[in-house]
Amino acid sequence: MAFDGLMIKGIISELNKNILNSRVEKIYQPNQDEVLIKLYGTTGKSNLRVVTSSDNYRIHLTNSVKGNPFTAPNFCMVLRKYLTSSRLRNIYTNGLERTVFIDFDSIDEEKNLQKYTLVVELMGKYSNVILINSNNIIINSLKHFRETEDSKRNILPGYKYEEIQSNKYDLTKTSNYKEFFNIISNADSLDAKSNLIDIFSSEMVGVSKVLVKSIIKDLNITYSIKDVYNCLYNLYSNADKLICVNFEQNYTVKLSNNKDNFTQINDFIDNFYETKEESQNFILYRNSLLKLILNKVKKLNNKLTNVNKKLAECNNMDTYKLYGELIVNNMYKLDNSHLENITLNNYYTGEDITIPLDKSLTPYNNAQKYFKKYNKLKNALSFVKEQENEIQEQLSYLESIVYELEASNTIEEVTEIYDEITNNVLIKDISNKKQNKVNVKKKKPNNRIYKFDKEQFIRFKIDDFDVFVGKNNVQNDYLTLKFASDNDLWFHTKDIHGSHVILRIQDKQPPQEVINKVASIAAKYSKAKFSSNVPVDYTYVKYVKKPNKAKPGMVIYTHEQTVNVQPEK
């Protein structure tokens, strides 16, 4: 995490230029780890976001506003009571500690001026937002803590607020390298340190490893405590000139003499975390849906195992019929003794056969039992085969959904897949998940083919030919059955789940080289994308049909040709 003391200094410098003296219009608490303050000032409307989650803690201006719960949480109501219509007078920190103090002036009901401070502590899992009065008494806090071995303070209403005390060195307490070096030379852990990153991040408050790494890279040094110290002090002394930059899939601050955007750091942090949260939400959404699908696949596989056992039993039904016939035809040789088995001659093969019997029944009753079992299995055979085909069809469809989810890249694409499956095989499961098993009215499957704009498909241009690729089963249906013309070419991996691919044919026929390139694209957008030699079928769209009541994306085709290609890289 790179949200360190110097980052906060840069953010506060920008906040003081943009929202100082702004009036508090509204306060929201979108979730248990976040507070949003809507402000109005000389620069117009602004949104100040404070996030206290352990891995994404931060404070900054934001352009994105989340939805809010219908009932405001208790802490949000407290903030509204004391801070609504107040003026934001000051924002500051003490040194490089990751604690931000925001002072507000408010007029109470008796027209007296009251001062309140919102304390934002950005300390990992102990991150918090605390409202205190002018006497430093805690009015309330987002999170409550009692004094324990882990928490050295009481963060509870009515207690006096105490700042976090750190035993690390604060860069702002000295003004020269010599004094700094004398202090850290006495540090117990310094001798054990092997690099600059550990020395500064472990011994100095508010300095992250990412920041030190970026300084070392920029200075192109191997080991110079003095150079790193001077660079850090220069950054602190010019907090109003700091900008935020990407560094090794994270971010850090740098100095810029040409800074003309007074919200650059705030904008960068806002965009960085919005992208990160979108990615996290996408992964969470996709994985939860994938888990639901795989659970359904597991249930269907268990069901298929039972069906296969029944089929195996049905395959033996002629044996049960033979047992009954042999017993009945040899009744004149048998008495009514209760036997475990009898050996009779099989007149079809001329060989003797041993027939197991139910000892509690007579031979004749055993024969009737075998005939009854034969008739039962004979009647069940067609039903069981139909059931097997239905399960196989569902499994094939769900495998295509798994492929779609694994290939998806955005929340919108996952939502399209979610809409598709709620209209097909998973209505009951998803309804129970979403509504905590509340009884819901089961929807009828919706087989309507939704309309898509061509910009929603994946598009390629190959030698003046347009190529379109569907992203999911619903798009595949529309692409093939509605969007494409009869004389366009349709591509799909042979017996492998993948996207439908359309090669637009206009006035000329494509050469084989173009066909092979399109086939390699079809291989890329399939489950065989990591294979080395993939068979791809292609045919004219007019030969592609959708069977009645078939699942989305399921089609049959004829007049196809097959090429073996390497998936497009």
Image (cartoon, grey):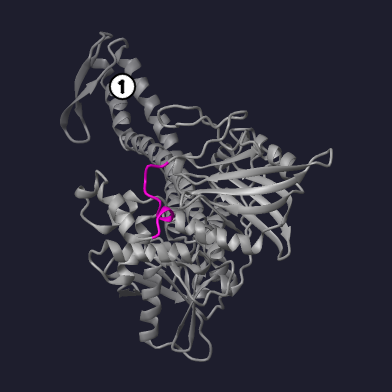
Q: Where is residue 15 in the image (x, y as percent from the top left)?
A: 60, 60
The residue identified by callout 1 is 328
Picture layout, residue 27 above or below residue 501? above
**Which residue sits at x=63%, y=64%?**
17
Mainly helix, strand or loop, the magenta region? loop
Q: Quadrant of the C terminus?
A: bottom left
**Which residue sits at x=27%, y=17%?**
357
Q: Where is residue 121 in the image (x, y as percent from the top left)?
A: 52, 44
Number of marks drawn: 1
334 on left or right of 527: left
Which residues, given as a range, are shown in magenta? 166-175
Depth order, front residue of 342/445 = 445
- Label 1 packing within 10 angstroms: few (<14), some (14-19), many (20+): some
Helix, strand, or loop for circle 1?
helix
Depth order, front residue of 442/337 = 442
Depth order, front residue of 216/349 = 216
Q: Where is residue 90 in the image (x, y as percent from the top left)?
A: 64, 53
Depth order, front residue of 324/243 = 243
162 on left or right of 494: right
Picture layout, residue 100 above or below residue 569? above
Residue 174 on the magenta segment? yes
- The type of residue carrying mark 1 is Val
260 on left or right of 39: left
Q: Quadrant of residue 391?
A: top left
Q: In which quarter of the image is residue 302?
A: top left
**Which residue sits at x=24%, y=43%?**
188
Residue 550 visible: no
**Which residue sits at x=36%, y=51%?**
204
Q: In which quarter of the image is residue 524?
A: bottom left
- Extreme residue in the left direction: 351
